[in-house]
C-alpha cells in the first residue's frame, strides 16, 4: 500500500489496522536535543481517546503510547522516533455482518475494488484508529513549535445546525467540554443534538476550526509546497473530512477585492502587519505573520444503525443495519487530530525554510562550534 507516509524533511509513516494487535508510526527527520517523554505525547492522545463520554464510540482504549526509539536519556537523538500504541478493546465479531457487503458512506467499496481483499474488522487501515498515530507524532512536532513561541487553539466550530458564536468563544474551555465547543451553551445544544441523533440511530457532521498564533512571516513555498496546499492536503487526509477553508474559505468567493484584501500597516514596533485576516495568515503560499486560521468540515459518521440499502460483494441487494460501537459524530475526537496534523505540516515547512537563504546556510556553517 503506497501513501502511508507524508512530509518532506520531517517525514511520518504510520502502520497498523483497527483490529490488529498494535498501531504505530515512525517520525523521521526530527531534530536532536529536544526533551521528550511518553507523558508529553499521552496528553494529546487522551484528547482523542474513545469511550470518554456518551458522545463518542464506547470502544475503550487506554491508548498508552510507548517510545521504542529516537529518545535517549529523555532527549530526542535525531534518529527515527518510533511510537507504538496497543489495541486492546476490539470486538471483531461486531463486524462479521459486514464481511461480504459494502457500508454506504464508508471505505469498503473502494477498498475492495482496489485490493480485492479487505480487513472488514473495524475498517482495517481505513479506520480512524490510524489517527492515533498522527496525534502521537504531531504531539512531538507541537512540543517543538511551542518552544518556538507558536500556540495552537483548535476547537469544534459546528455540529449539525449548532454553530459557535464567535462572541461566545471562551479560551479557558478549549478541550474542556464533551463536544469540544469552547462555549457552554453550544456544548449543551450540541450534546442534546448528538443524543437525539443516537436515539434515532443516525449520525451528524460538523466543523473543526484551528487558530495557530505566533507563526513568523515567511514560512511556506510559492508553488507545489504552498503552506495552504500542504495544510489542506493534511486535513483532507483525515478520515471523513470533506472540505477545508483557509481564513474566510469559501466565503471569499462571495466578496469583492476591496472587502477581501487585508490592508497592511506598520505597528509601533516597526513590524508590518495586516488590519484584518481574511486570508487566514497565508498569502502566495507563505505566511504573513497573522494567525493561521483553518476550518475542516467532517461528514456524518457513515456507520449508522438505521436501515440502509446496500449490496453484497456479488452484487445481490441487502438491507443493512450496522450495530457495534461507533462515534455518533466524529468532530469532538477529530479536533486534536486536526491540531497535531497542522503541527506536523508547519514544523516540516519551518525546517524546509532553513535553506531558503544563502546567509542562513553560511551562518550555520561559518559560526558553528568548530570543536563538534
Ligand atoms: C476521529 C474519527 C472517528 C471516527 N469514528 C468512526 C466510527 O466510529 N464509525 C465509522 O463508521 N466511521 C468513523 N469515522 C469515519 C471513517 O473513518 C471514514 O468515514 C471512513 O474511513 C471513510 O473515509 P471518508 O469518509 O474519508 O471517505 C471516524 C473518523 C474520525 C476522524
Image (cartoon, helix red, strand yellow):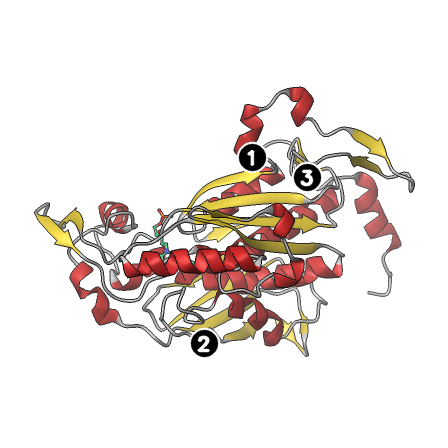
* Element at label 1: helix
Q: 15 or 57: nearer the eye? A: 57
* Element at label 2: loop
Q: Quadrant of the C terminus?
A: bottom right
Residue at 76 percent across and 45 percent down: it is: 216
User: How far apart, in angstroms, are the residues tagged by discs 1 and 2?
Assistant: 36 Å
Count all numbered tags in the image, as a single digit: 3
Of the numbered discs in the image, which one, if any, rests on residue 249? 1
Q: Is residue 127 visible?
A: no
Q: Residue furthest left?
A: 316
First in residue order: circle 3 vs circle 2: 2
Q: Are marks 3 and 2 in contact (CB under 8 Å)?
A: no
From the image, state whether disc 1 or disc 3 is nearer to you.
Answer: 1
List x then y, in percent, for residue 266: 87, 34
Q: Which residue is mark 2?
A: 62
Q: Are marks 1 and 3 in contact (CB under 8 Å)?
A: no
User: How far apart, in angstroms, are the residues tagged by discs 3 and 2?
Assistant: 37 Å
Of the numbered discs in the image, which one, if any, rests on residue 281? 3
User: How far apart, in angstroms, are the residues tagged by discs 1 and 3?
Assistant: 12 Å
Of the numbered discs in the image, which one, if any, rests on residue 154? none
Residue 179 vs 36, above or below: the answer is above
For residue 280, side relative to residue 263 (left or right): left
Residue 289 vs 27, above or below: the answer is above
Q: Quadrant of residue 201?
A: bottom left
Residue at 66 percent across and 30 percent down: it is: 284
List x then y, in percent, for residue 369: 87, 61
* Element at label 3: loop
Q: 80 or 39: nearer the eye? A: 39
Amino acid at each position: 500500500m503506497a501513501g502511508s507516509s507524508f512530509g518532506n524533511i520531517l517525514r511520518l509513516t504510520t502502520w497498523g489496522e483497527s483490529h490488529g494487535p498494535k498501531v504505530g508510526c515512525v517520525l523521521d527527520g526530527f531534530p536532536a536535543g529536544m526533551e521528550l517523554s511518553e507523558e508529553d505525547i499521552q496528553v494529546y492522545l487522551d484528547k482523542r481517546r474513545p469511550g470518554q463520554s456518551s458522545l463518542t464510540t464506547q470502544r475503550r482504549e487506554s491508548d498508552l503510547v510507548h517510545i521504542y526509539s529516537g529518545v535517549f536519556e529523555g532527549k530526542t537523538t535525531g534518529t527515527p522516533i518510533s511510537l507504538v500504541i496497543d489495541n486492546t478493546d476490539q470486538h471483531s465479531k461486531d463486524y462479521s455482518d459486514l464481511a461480504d457487503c459494502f457500508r454506504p458512506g464508508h471505505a469498503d467499496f473502494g477498498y475492495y475494488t482496489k485490493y480485492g481483499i479487505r480487513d472488514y474488522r473495524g475498517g482495517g487501515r481505513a479506520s480512524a484508529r490510524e489517527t492515533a498515530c498522527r496525534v502521537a507524532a504531531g504531539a512531538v512536532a507541537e512540543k517543538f513549535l511551542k518552544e518556538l513561541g507558536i500556540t495552537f487553539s483548535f476547537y469544534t466550530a459546528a455540529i449539525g445546525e449548532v454553530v459557535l458564536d464567535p462572541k461566545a468563544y471562551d479560551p479557558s474551555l478549549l478541550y474542556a467540554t464533551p463536544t469540544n465547543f469552547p462555549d457552554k451553551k453550544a456544548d449543551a445544544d450540541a450534546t442534546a443534538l448528538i443524543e437525539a441523533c443516537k436515539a434515532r440511530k443516525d449520525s451528524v457532521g460538523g466543523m473543526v476550526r484551528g487558530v495557530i498564533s505566533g507563526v513568523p512571516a515567511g514560512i511556506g513555498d510559492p508553488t507545489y509546497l504552498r503552506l495552504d496546499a500542504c495544510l489542506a492536503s493534511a486535513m483532507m487526509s483525515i478520515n471523513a473530512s470533506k472540505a477545508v477553508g483557509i481564513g474566510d474559505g469559501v466565503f471569499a468567493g462571495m466578496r469583492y477585492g476591496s472587502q477581501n484584501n487585508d490592508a497592511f500597516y506598520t505597528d509601533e514596533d516597526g513590524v508590518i502587519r495586516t488590519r484584518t485576516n481574511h486570508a487566514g495568515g497565508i498569502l502566495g503560499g507563505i505566511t504573513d505573520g497573522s494567525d493561521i486560521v483553518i476550518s475542516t468540515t467532517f461528514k456524518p459518521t457513515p456507520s449508522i444503525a438505521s436501515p440502509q440499502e446496500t449490496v453484497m460483494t456479488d452484487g445481490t441487494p441487502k438491507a443493512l443495519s450496522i450495530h457495534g460501537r461507533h462515534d455518533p459524530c466524529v468532530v469532538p475526537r477529530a479536533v486534536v487530530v486536526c491540531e497535531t496534523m497542522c503541527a506536523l505540516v508547519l514544523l516540516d515547512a519551518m525546517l524546509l525554510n532553513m535553506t531558503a537563504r544563502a546567509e542562513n546556510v553560511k551562518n550555520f556553517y561559518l559560526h558553528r562550534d568548530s570543536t563538534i
